[in-house]
Image (cartoon, grey):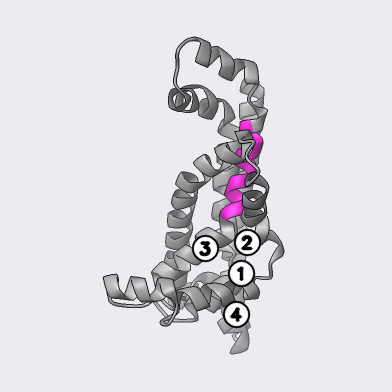
Amino acid sequence: MEVLQNLEWTPFILTFKVAFITTFLLLIIGIPTAYFLAYSNLKIKSAIEALTALPLVLPPSVLGFYLLLVMGKNGPLGKLWESIVGHQLAFHFEGVVIASVIFSLPFMVHPLIAGFKSIPKSLIEASYTLGKSKLSTLLNVILPNMKASIITGITLTFAHTIGEFGVVLMIGGNIEGETRVVSIAIYDAVEKLDYTTAHIYSAILFVISFFVLLIVYTLNKRLEVKY
């Protein structure tokens, strides 16, 4: 009990802050991206699909290295950000969020693509026949009928962001109160041979991740029964 009282909770606050913001941004980015990839016949579609899936196969250190070059003090995005905000993106909270959005992109987009493809074309065509626009059909017909895919995308993105390590370490470093998320705190504790703290951080993260996934599977089963 005394250990829990002395435990530093700031890494958890930062972790969930990054996860919530990343998930929200990716939901906004993911819906139009997945819509395009699901329904478009353009030749550029394959290239965009490959770019979207790239974080799944690239080592986090490789992705983090190139993001660091772009978002660092001498990088194009880093320079632009510093001229507007007053500090570079790398080794700051905003940089971690941007890196998390890029690294977690496929975890949002892929479930949404599956959801869009699961909608019967006859349902979409019926909406168009009734005079509904593409936007109205998307909002009132397609999205309400792919709730399970949306929930899966949100949950996987959130859970994946919570557990990020390599990219966060490359872009954010280990700055207390700014970029030191739980995964970094665990690594730091192990380096110091503080296994008690590492155990507690890891156990809390394990339990949270398990219940997040349990919720998504439970909700998806209920939605399958409903529809």
The magenta stretch spans which residues?
105-116
Residue 202 is marked as: 1
Front position in the image: 98 or 66: 66
Q: Nearer the viewer, mark 4 or mark 3?
A: 3
What's under tag 2, amino acid-wise?
Phe
Find numbered disc 3 in the image and state the secondary structure of the residue it sits on: helix
Front position in the image: 125 or 15: 125
Please tell me whether residue 120 is drawn above or below residue 23 in the rendered image.
above
Q: Hey, which residue is sitting farthest right in the picture?
A: 57
Q: Nearer the viewer, mark 3 or mark 1?
A: 3
Q: Quadrant of residue 179?
A: bottom left
Q: Is residue 12 magenta?
A: no
Q: Residues within 10 Å of mark 2 (few under 14, many from 20)?
A: few
- Report the residue marked by disc 2: 206
Q: Residues within 10 Å of mark 4 (few under 14, many from 20)?
A: some
* N-terminal-most mark, 4 or 2: 4
Q: Nearer the viewer, mark 4 or mark 2?
A: 4
Residue ID at (61%, 73%): 166
Separation (CA) of disc 2 from disc 3: 20 Å
Q: Nearer the viewer, mark 2 or mark 3?
A: 3
| Label pair 2/1, CB-CB below 8 angstroms | yes
Front position in the image: 48 or 13: 48
Please tell me whether residue 107 is drawn above or below residue 65 in the rendered image.
above
Name the quadrant of the C terminus: top right
